[in-house]
Amino acid sequence: MKPPHRSSLWWLYAALLGAGMLLRAIDLWRPVDGTVREAWRECDIAAVARNFYVEGMNILYPRIDWRGDGPGFAEMEFPGLSWSIAVLYKIFGFHEHLGRIVPFAFSVASLVVFLLLAARYLKPTASVIALAFFVASPLGIRTSNSLQPEAVMLCLLLLAVYGFMRWLEEGGSRWFWLTAVGTACALLAKINAAHIGLFFLGLLLVRKGMSSLWSTRIWVLALVAVLPAALWYAHAHQLWLAYHNSLGLSNEYIWFGWEFFTNRRFLLGIVRIEALFVWMPLGWLVGAYALRKERGPTVQAALIWLGVVFVYYVATSRTTSEDWAIYYHVVSVPPAAMLFGAGAGLVVERWGHGARRALSAAFFLALAVVAGRLALGFAPTIPAAIVVTLVAAGLLTASAFRKGLPKRLSQWRARVAESLVLFSAASTFVFLGFRIAKDVHPRHMQAMYECAEQIGPAIAEDALIVTSGGHKLDEDGYPLAINAPYLFYWLGHKGFSLAVEDQSIAALAELASRGARYFVAEREALAQQTGFEEELRQRFPLLAECDELELFLLTREGADVHQHSFRAAVPSDHFGETQR
C-alpha cells in the first residue's frame, strides 16, 4: 500500500493537532472549586500562586497555606508554574481559570513536539496513528489543564528527547543545547523527569558504544542538565529543614522496598493503571506486534524508553501503584504511542484502505463518544464501554477483511495475528473515547466545596484554622504527607493540618495554644477515631455543620484542660510546622 501523499499527510497532522487542542480545551474555563481532579495537588499549586500574588513574587520562596503559625515557605519543585499563574493574576486580576491556561499551552506544545518526533522517526502511516494515539491519550488530556506540573514537564521532556535523538544522529550545538536546556527545565518542573537520564544513557550505549561515555561533551551535557535542578532542590531542602513544610519530597517515603516482592499490590497497581489509562487495555498487543516485526532503531528506542519508565515506576512504586497517582503515568504515553503507531502502521500498510478506514472510523467513534458526553451528559460505565468497544472493534476489523483466504498455514498465522492487531488497535481508539468521556466534568469534590462555602462565613477573617489531614503512615508503616490543602484554599485561611491518627482534644489544645481558633473537621476523618466526635461536641462549641464538615470554635476553656500534658508529650514539629 502506498503511504499518504505528503500534502495530504500534513493535512492529517493538522486535523489531529486541531482535535488535540479541542480535547484539551474541555473544562479549561473552570475555577479551583469542587471540579478539581487532583484536589491536593491542584489546590496546593493554586495556593502557592495566590500567595505569590498576595504576599510577594519572590520565586525562590514559595508559600503554602497549611503553614501553621509560620511563614509557609515550602519544599517543592521549582514553582515556575505557580509563579507564571501569579504573573497572569498581576496582569489581568485574580481569576482562577487563568491558571489553567499555562499547563494548557504546554500541553498543546507537547502535541507539536511529539508530531516532530513521530514524523521524523516513524513511517508516514505509523506517524499518523501514533499522533492519533497521543492526541487522544486520557492522561494527556487529564493533565492538560490541571493545575499541576505534569503538562509542563512532559512538554520539556519531549523537547529533550527530540533534541537528544537529533544530536546522536547529526551532532551540532543546537541539538546539544536543546537537550541540555530541555532536560534541565524538565527536572525543575518536576524531579520525576530524572528517569529520562537513564533513557539517554541506554540509547547512547546502544548507538555509540561504551567509549562514548568518556566524551567531554557528554559530561558537559550532564552537568548543564542536572546543575540547575541540583541547586534548586538543595535550596528547597533547606526550606524543609527550616520550616518543615514539604509537598511530598521530604515528608513522604515513595521508594521501592522488599515489600514489592512480598505484596503483589505494587506490581498489580502499576500494571492495572498502565492497562486502563495508557494502553486501553489491548493496545499493548499492538506494541508487542511492533517489537516482533519491526527491529529498526525507532522501535528499539521506544522499547528502551518504555523500559526505563517501568524501572522508574518500580523504584517509586509506593506512589505509582496507587489509584490517586495515575497522572504519574503520563510519561508512558509517548513511547507507548510510538510503539502503537509502529505496530498498527505495519498492518494498515499490508491490509490497505480497508484497515485505514477501520481505524479512522474507530477514532471518529471515540470523538463522537466524547461529543455525546459533552452535548447530552451521557456518562458511560466501564462495563458498557467495554462491550461497545469490543463489538465496534469486531465490526470494523471484519469490514477491513477484504483479502482472499490464505492457502498456507504460515499465511493463516500471519492473517490471524494481523486481524488481532487491527482489532486491538480499533478497540484501543474506541476505548480512548469512553475513558475521556468518563473523565470530563469532574465533580467528586463538589459536595465538600459547597460545604466549605456554607461554613466559611462563620470563620473570623485572618483567623488560623485546623483542618482534617491524611494518614501519617501507609499500611507498611512508611511516612505519608498529611497536609490536605483544599479546605485552606477554599476558605481563604491559613493554619494546621491534623493527621487522622493524631485526632484528640489534647492535640487541638496544643494547636489552640499556637493560635488556632477553629477546627474544620471532615466527618469522614472524625469517624476513623472512635468517640472523638462525641468528645469534640462536649468540649468545644459547634458553630456550623453540613453533610461533609463540622466547624468547632477552639475556646480557651475547652483547650486548657489538656494543654499542659500534651506540650510535654509532643515535639514542636509534630504537625509539620516549626513552633515559634
Image: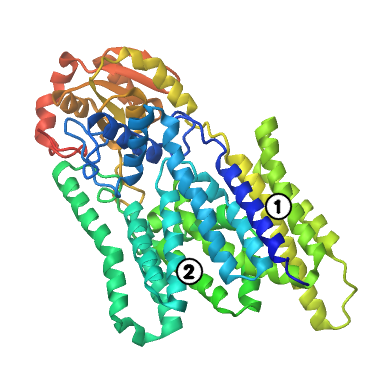
Nearer to me, 73 or 243: 73
Query: Is 254 left or right of 305, judged from the image as shown?
Result: left
Q: Position of residue 374 (x, y in %)?
A: 65, 34
Q: Which label belongs to residue 305?
A: 2
Residue 519 image-quadrant placement = top left
Q: Which residue shows up at 25% across the image and 34% down it? A: 502
Nearer to me, 58 or 314: 58
Q: Mark 2, residues whose alpha carbon is within 10 Å: few (<14), some, or many (≥20)? A: many
In the rendered view of the protein, which quadrant contains the N terminus?
Answer: bottom right
Residue 454 image-quadrant placement = top left
Q: Which residue shows up at 75% across the image and 47% down it? A: 388
In the rendered view of the protein, which quadrant contains the C terminus?
Answer: top left
**Which element type, helix, strand or loop, lies under badge 1?**
helix
Decide: is 319 above or below 515.
below
Decide if residue 484 is in sight here. Answer: no
Whether tag 1 and tag 2 are in contact, CB under 8 A, the answer is no
**Which element type, helix, strand or loop, lies under badge 2?**
helix
Q: Which residue is mark 1?
A: 363
Q: Position of residue 246 (x, y in %)?
A: 25, 44
Decide if residue 201 is in sight here. Answer: yes
Decide: is 94 above or below 126.
above
Nearer to me, 217 or 226: 217
Decide: is 568 above or below 532.
below
